[in-house]
Amino acid sequence: MGVEITNRVLPGIGVCQEVALHDGRRVGVVTRRNGLRDIVIYDDDGDGADATVALTDDEANAVAEILGAPQLTFRLAALQRQADGLIVEQLPVPADSPFAHRPLGDTQARTRTGASIVAVLRQGAAMASPTPDFVLFPGDLVVTVGTQASVNQVAHLLDGSTEVGPAGTG
Amino acid sequence: VLAAGGGSDLHVSTLLVELGAILFVLGVLGRVARLLRIPVIPLYLAAGLFFGQGGVLSLSASEDFLKVSADIGVILLLVMLGLEYSARELKDSLRTQAPIGLLDGLLNALPGALVALLAGWGGLAALALAGVTWVSSSGVIAKTLGDLGRLGNRETPAILGVLVIEDLMMALYLPVLTALLAGGGASTVVIAIVVAVSTVSVVIVLATRFGRHVTLLISADDRESLLLGVLGLTLLVAGIADQLKVSAAVGAFLVGIAVSGTVAETATELLAPLRDVFAAAFFVTFGLSTNPGDLVPMLPMAILLVVVTSSTKMATGYVAARRANVKRRGRWRAAVALIPRGEFSVVIAALAVAAGVDDRIGPLTACYVLLTIVLAAAVQGLPNRLAATPTRRLRGRRDRSELGGREP
């Protein structure tokens, strides 16, 4: 799983780190001394930039957090497993789920079961702390934290084996 | 202090009005430069031409103040340059880029010297003009690379390498020029060279080995005392260097190199606004001291210099990028990137004019710097219109379609 990273010193400006991707393309990150970060997508030559995006310190941290989120979730999961009575599970949203194509808030998972939905994994990317208006799709994995019983209840909500009446008062 | 006479009050109020007007105009010009996507230096020079002797508006009260500001501006430009480079970067660049630095010096300094000699301006003018055409503007180029999103490019380290060597060579060139301009004989020049070479080497060695200790004198915790400390130290060393005829600018550059770590980072941040104000004053003052009427007769010579030394700079950049295994398009990008001349050319011309070498160096350099910057801004985009190397393009397309096929 080694990823090849080339470092280039840019005297007076900072450093550029170039990452070789699995498909032969390359991306780079320029870290300037003043905190700005540039994300570079290299062109077909491999020398120049097809596109460059400059990020402020805060923006760079936000992107880094998103990219690092899956790892974070799994590490969190490992930790939580050891915590007494609490479990973390990735619950699938089946194609025939009553909540497919509906906002997360409609499940009212926390009100109904007491379990918390901390992230949604979609095609390998993690959406951390999804808001109630986040729309679920078939194939999503809903990362849920709670007691075994409450997590099971969420699983039943998602696969439709628990009959859910019209949304209650919450 | 308050008991100043009426005449002095009037003088102060005129000074404030003139300074305020100049700074305000420069502020507006900065905005214009941003909109036009060109560097601001040519506009500052033009503003100086507009205000100064023979210009549309002439200034009276603020001239002395501007002259001192200009001197401080040069010192701040140089100390910031020194702060930006760490001693390690300088050493590494010198080790890896020395052949390119030599090629760069030969290709670009000689045309300037030759033109001055052919025009019959004499040896000192030739030496000064050699410096004017030699050094690219690290300020303009670094800014352009950032604005165009080219910092991550493969050719960028090669471009910056050329700039580092040039800036370092200035630490040797300026003392020699200063000594010769001061009218010293052969012995004075030899002493200046020996002092310059040994000081530069000692500072680089000290800064790489004991940088922390030098820096310990000034703490990074208290921003106010750091600002005053670094500024004071810089002016002090620059002043002493000037008295020793080693050039104030080089003294400031060496202070910048010697200061390292967090102190250097914080100092860069704190000094930047000061540098912006005083460096602007420097470019304006250079424009002020130049009579716009003198520009026109200098135009043919300036154009000749621009044509010749832009080609030689492009050759330098092309070779530097090829040496870094960059493909054709990137080589051309490096070639055009190096064209602009700027702060160092003006510093050198200002020194020569102040020493009374030849008055025509001022307007010639003003024309030359303006033209190189405008030309460079006009051609930066051209290399990317060249076709890419075809084999890679096909491969990239296939890869993309494979990725596309995986989508649900």
Image (cartoon, coloured by chain):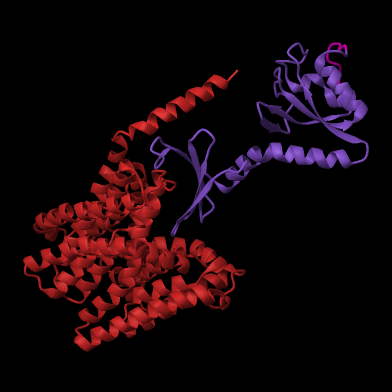
Quadrant into which the N terminus of chain B falls: bottom left
Q: Nearer the viewer, residue B29 or A92?
A: A92
Residue A169 sits in which quadrant? top right
Quadrant into which the C terminus of chain B falls: top right
- The chain coloured purple is A
Residue found farthest to the bottom: B187
Residue B251 sits in which quadrant? bottom left
The x and y percentages for residue A136 are: 71, 20
How many numbered circles are shown? 0
Residue B97 in the figure: left or right of residue A151 = left
Q: Does residue B289 show up magenta in the picture?
A: no
- Residue drawn at point x = 19 percent, y = 52 percent: B311
Chain B painted colour = red
Q: Nearer the viewer, residue B299 or B201?
A: B201
Q: Does residue A165 show up magenta in the picture?
A: yes
Is residue B154 visible to the viewer in this orientation of the structure?
yes
Q: Is residue B312 above or below residue B69?
A: above
Is residue B4 visible to the viewer in this orientation of the structure?
no
The x and y percentages for residue B143 are: 39, 52
Q: Main secondary structure of the magenta part?
A: loop
The x and y percentages for residue B237 are: 41, 80
- Residue drawn at point x = 9 percent, y = 55 percent: B300
Q: Nearer the viewer, residue B125 or B389?
A: B389
Q: Is residue A109 above or below residue B271?
A: above
Q: Is residue B300 above or below residue A103?
A: below
- Residue drawn at point x = 21 percent, y = 80 percent: B180
The x and y percentages for residue B226 are: 55, 71
Task: Please state the extent of the stretch shown in magenta in the rendering.
Answer: A163-170
